[in-house]
Image (cartoon, rainbow, N blue to C red):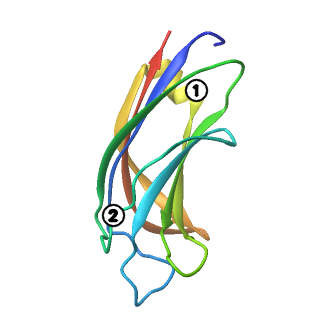
């Protein structure tokens, strides 16, 4: 796997339920390769169904286990809030070459929306 690369897209999300139930989130997406952040999208103001369509690429330098998509709610006066996350195992990416689908966003064991992602494995 070393010397290979992946491209990842945080495409969009829908049906977001923010941590503050009475507040519409200002969501953005952070993408992690294992625990290393490789991308952060721009935030979308007051949007339960944001479209980001932002892409990044990274060269793999060793064994990697997963790609994690984390949606956050941007706050101006306080720390940004966690909305939910979705995880894609590297095994699925390597075996199919391209993954382009929706994943449930999970927070505290409950689904809080759906994220639409794409990941390409480049050898």
Along the viewing direction, whichever of 24 and 45 lies nearer the viewer? 45
| Residue at image mark 1 | 91
| Left or right: 5, with 108 as reference point | left
Q: Assign the N terminus to one quadrant of the image.
A: top right
Residue 51 drawn above or below residue 45 = above
- The x and y percentages for residue 13 are 34, 57
Numbered circle sitting on residue 82: none
Image height of 3 relative to 34, above or below? above
Asked which quadrant contains residue 15, the reply is: bottom left
SS label for mark 1 = helix
Which residue shows up at 43% across the image and 59% down it? Answer: 28
Alpha-carbon span between mark 1 and mark 2 = 31 Å
| Residue 85 relative to residue 97: left or right | right
Q: Is residue 30 above or below residue 109?
A: above
**Disc 2 packing (10 Å; few <14; some 14–19; many ≥20):** some
Going from N to C along the chain, the mark reached first, 1 or 2, is 2
Disc marking residue 44: 2
């Amino acid at each position: 796997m070393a010397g290979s690369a992946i491209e990842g897209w945080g495409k969009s999300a829908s049906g977001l339920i923010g941590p503050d139930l009475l507040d519409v989130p200002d969501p953005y997406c952070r993408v992690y390769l294992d625990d290393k952040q490789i991308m952060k999208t721009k935030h979308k103001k007051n949007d339960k169904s944001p479209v980001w369509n932002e892409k990044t690429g990274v060269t793999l330098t060793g064994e990697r286990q997963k790609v994690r998509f984390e949606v956050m709610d941007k706050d101006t006066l306080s720390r940004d809030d966690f909305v939910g996350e979705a995880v894609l195992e590297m095994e699925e990416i390597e075996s199919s070459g391209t993954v382009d689908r929706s994943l449930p966003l999970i927070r505290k064991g409950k689904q809080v929306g759906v994220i639409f992602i794409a990941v390409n494995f480049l050898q």
